[in-house]
Amino acid sequence: MKNQNKVQYPILGFLIQYPMSGYALKKQMDVSVANFMSPSFGNIYPTLNRLKEAGMIEAIPQKDARKKVIYHATEKGKSHFLTWMRGKPEDPFLAQVYFMNLISKKERAKLIQSYIEEKTSTVKHLEDLEKRYRKEMGHYAHQTLTYGKYIYTQEITFYKGMLEGENQ
């Protein structure tokens, strides 16, 4: 399944933990991952259909008046999700952080360390740009670069603290 649809991973993560309807899934996302990902019903249901067609989830119709469907992850879906979790950090990284309870402590530490290294490289790149082009940059162009360095440095500090917690 193509990785173009980033909402597929949180959907799989939730369905690995708890079978639920599309409506319950949307409500769960609204109270949990909405600070970094806020899919609409118009995004959730097509994603559920694609995951179902790919054999990553199953849909179980309920025998009630509302004709509700409960979805749950299959072994293929769990495997696909865990491959993503154990892979490289992706944007938004917080989606992987949210589901870190589903991988081992060693895997969490590796993923966090990889993210720290990626952001450290980004800060170095921004510092190199600043050294080379500071004189040519206008004030506001420089402010955007300064902002980027600041944000990434704060992220690095945050995730280093998280990594220390994993190593205790």
Image (cartoon, helix red, strand yellow):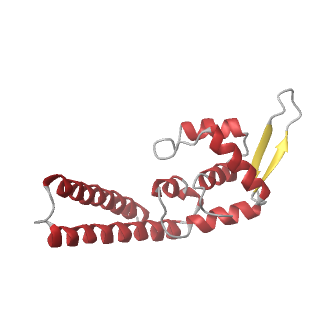
Q: Tell me residue 62's x, y (percent).
A: 85, 37
**Is residue 58 rendered to the left or right of residue 37?**
right
Q: Nearer the viewer, residue 21 or 47?
A: 47
Say which residue appears at 16% left-offset and 69% top-offset.
133
Say which residue appears at 57% left-offset and 63% top-offset.
103
Say which residue appears at 64% left-offset and 62% top-offset.
81
Q: Tell me residue 145's x, y (percent).
A: 23, 59
Quarter holding the C terminus is bottom left
User: Can you name the residue that lies furthest to the left here?
Assistant: 135
Q: Quadrant of residue 22?
A: top right
**Is residue 48 rendered to the left or right of residue 82?**
right
**Is residue 138 rendered to the left or right of residue 104?**
left
Q: Tell me residue 1's x, y (percent).
A: 69, 64
Q: Tell me residue 74's x, y (percent).
A: 77, 58
User: Can you name the residue that lies furthest to the top here?
Assistant: 65
Image height of 22 relative to 123, above or below: above
Say which residue appears at 27% left-offset and 57% top-offset.
148
Image height of 17 relative to 126, above or below: above
